[in-house]
Image (cartoon, rainbow, N blue to C red):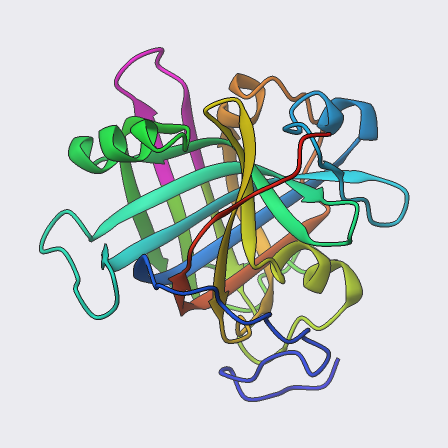
Amino acid sequence: MSPSNSNAAPALWPAAPPLPRPVLSDQVWADAVFLHWRIEREVAARYMPPGVEPDEFDGSAWVGLIGFQMRRAGLGKNLPLPYFGNFAEINVRLYSREPDGTRGVVFRSLEAPRLAFVAGARLAGIPYVWARCRRTETRAVPVAGASGAAGIRGTSFGYASERFRGGATTQFSVLPDLNTVAADDLSLHLTSRFGLHAEILDRTRYLPNTHRPWPLHPATLTTLDDGLVAAAGIHVEGPPESVLYSPGVRTFFGKPRTLAAP
């Protein structure tokens, strides 16, 4: 790929569908780190709510470990919550698809340090977990080249967490290449998502959101010691196949809908 402006977005990013009103929440997701592994379709299918199936790419389902900095989260539009609307979050997620082609994510867990936020989200059916969750940043990180000599330097971004109950932990960081845009089909498949599927009150619901294209950059994995994916009931081996970084986007959530009973 040729070097590009660090704020550029992939040219093939799909257009977000119109957001059903009213706007329920307005958030900024900053310094996002995406790690993804291939998994068997049958593994992902175990955790799909009724009416949706795993959304595959290149013959595989995928599981993601994603960390980002939540900023200015609040109810409605332009109504950020002081303190409670700013925190680091880490989630484990799968990718879903409805019969009509609507694509989304299915969360297996979401780590956050704000107990009030966690409690409210769990009441709404979103599987947040209370944890000591924080963003990490390390400057001037050398990356070894193929010959073993020190290569590029820069700032690595990452996240670490420890659950208050159960003790599951994670720590991961990446060094992004901010001179290159990630515009390959897999990167778009994993990040161009405009809603989530969840089983709430015995029915599958779709909560839509919208945002401009992620500014996406390929990244080099610098640290990985994770127990959250395994705690979500999913086994992966080796390093992630896809490693991405984004400085972030602002997103809006709209009115949810209920899927027809399968």
Residue lying farthest top? Answer: 166
Going 49% across and 26% down the picture, which residue do you hit?
228
The answer to whether 121 is drawn above or below residue 191 in the figure is above
Going 65% across and 22% down the picture, which residue do you hit?
234
Which of the 4 quarters of the picture holds residue 260?
A: top right
- Residue 118: x and y in percent read 26, 32
What is the quadrant of the N terminus in the image?
bottom right
How many numbered dots are placed on residues in this image?
A: 0
Q: Is residue 40 visible?
A: no
Is 114 in front, or is 160?
Answer: 114
What is the quadrant of the C terminus in the image?
top right
Q: Is residue 65 visible?
A: yes
Going 35% across and 56% down the picture, which residue do you hit?
138
Which of the 4 quarters of the picture holds residue 261?
A: top right
The answer to whether 166 is drawn above or below residue 196 in the figure is above
Is 85 situated left or right of 49 in this image?
left
- Residue 115: x and y in percent read 18, 30
Going 59% across and 44% down the picture, which residue do you hit?
105
* 152 magenta-colored: no
Residue lying farthest left? Answer: 82
- Residue 2: x and y in percent read 72, 86
Is 129 situated left or right of 218 in this image?
left
Q: Which residues are magenta?
A: 160-171
